[in-house]
Image (cartoon, rainbow, N blue to C red):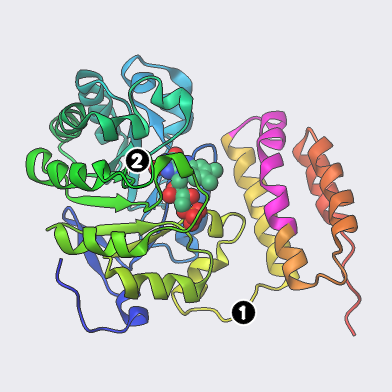
Amino acid sequence: MVRTNLRPMDRLLETWELGGVEVKNRVLLAPLAGIGNWFVRLQAKRYGAGLTVSEMVSSHGLAYGDKRTRNEFLRLHPDEGPTSVQLFGADPAIMREAASIVAESGADLIDLNMGCPVKKVCRTGAGSALLGDPDTAVAVAAAAREGSGLPVTVKLRPGVKPGERTGVELARRLVDEAGVCGIAFHPRHASQQHKGLPDYELAREVVEDLPVPVLISGGLMSEEKSRKVMDITGAEAILLARGSLGNPWLFERVLGEREGLPTIDEVLAEWNWVLDRAGEHYEDGRAARYLRKFHPWYLDRLKEIDGEWFTRARLNEINMALQDSDSLDSTRTAIAAIELPAIA
Ligand SMILES: Cc1cc2nc3c(=O)[nH]c(=O)nc-3n(C[C@H](O)[C@H](O)[C@H](O)COP(=O)(O)O)c2cc1C
């Protein structure tokens, strides 16, 4: 893709198109398994995300009519769009069927997972296993397009082991032979999982080589880093992942709409918003248990704001109460009991 002379900040604010879908800016929410449900995506959207990608959804689960896959993982909120639903799978016929169900759900795009290093996924030939099976990868992507009629992107990595370039070569084939409209590139090899420095120079090479938008994921924990990576890679857009966990303010900061940290009151209000939404998604006990992984992220925000008051010991104590909670009421009570520093 042609690189422009705009400053990274101005580019981030530009409207652009991905497979014909208008996206209002270039700061997107990455797919996050076990996390990126409709309300996490809606939250990202409230804080400015131009597009969000769902947690990965099993193509088998959808094609075989698994109720949990259909009702939980594929649940979309009317106000959250544009949304891309990420599917994983390695069987073209099943992918075709699953993609048609995604199209009926009202999703705007489909993203295919060809980067997940988790054994359970790779054992089935899906995720990053597809980096080593390019013919199947191309057939799966073509089937997703045919089955859905939606624009399809693929998220992948440079290869399985450091030094490999199978993912770079596959990206080109996916565009040329399967007609995918964009590539989300996470420039860490699958064996690195989420550790180590992303290779942004390699990402830039991919951006320059491909005739479609390339979205970059990896290591985007701050506004400075996000802008720098836009600049180094010339990417079309960036995908925020771990930096956004319990931190929707990062979207505003990267977009230049907020300077500095949220206040304690803002953190508490947002945390409670998440509780309310989880209560709409699951029955009470399940919602409380599901949210246990979310609490440490919001506690981290408090520590970030006032580490002298919210010491590690104090936060551990609060977290223990939250991890024991098995109802939304007791979760609310534990959050309400958080002592706030006296205003000087
Ligand atoms: C908890 C967790 C779940 C993830 N789930 C998915 C997923 O379902 N699909 C996917 O393509 N990538 C997934 N990823 C990878 C992220 O989308 C992202 O590429 C990766 O975390 C690198 O970005 P970061 O360094 O900014 O976190 C996941 C990462 C984490 C930490």
Q: Which residues are magenta?
A: 282-299
Q: Is residue 104 left or right of residue 177?
A: right
Residue 7 visible in image: yes
User: CB at mark 1 closer than 8 A to ligand 1?
Assistant: no
Residue at the left extreme of this rendering: 177
Q: Residue 329: x and y, percent? A: 80, 41
Disc number placed over residue 260 in the picture, else none: 1
Q: Residue at x 12, y 31 (%)?
A: 146
| SS class, disc 2 | strand
The answer to whether residue 39 is above or below residue 253 is above
Disc 1, disc 2: CB below 8 Å? no
Our reading of the magenta stretch's main secondary structure is helix
Q: Residue 113: x and y, percent? A: 34, 37
Q: Is residue 211 left or right of residue 226?
A: left
Q: Amino acid at mark 2?
A: Val
Query: Does the magenta portion include 230?
Result: no
Question: Which image quadrant is residue 236 in?
Answer: bottom left
Q: Is residue 324 left or right of residue 41?
A: right
Q: Residue at x 80, y 72 (%)?
A: 306
Q: Earlier in the sequence, mark 1 or mark 2?
A: 2
Q: Residue 171: x and y, percent? A: 20, 46
Q: CA distance from mark 1 to mark 2?
A: 32 Å
| SS class, disc 1 | loop
Q: Amino acid at mark 1?
A: Gly
> Looking at the image, how many numbered discs can be counted on the residues?
2
Between 116 and 86, the one lying in front of the other is 116
Disc number placed over residue 85 in the picture, else none: 2
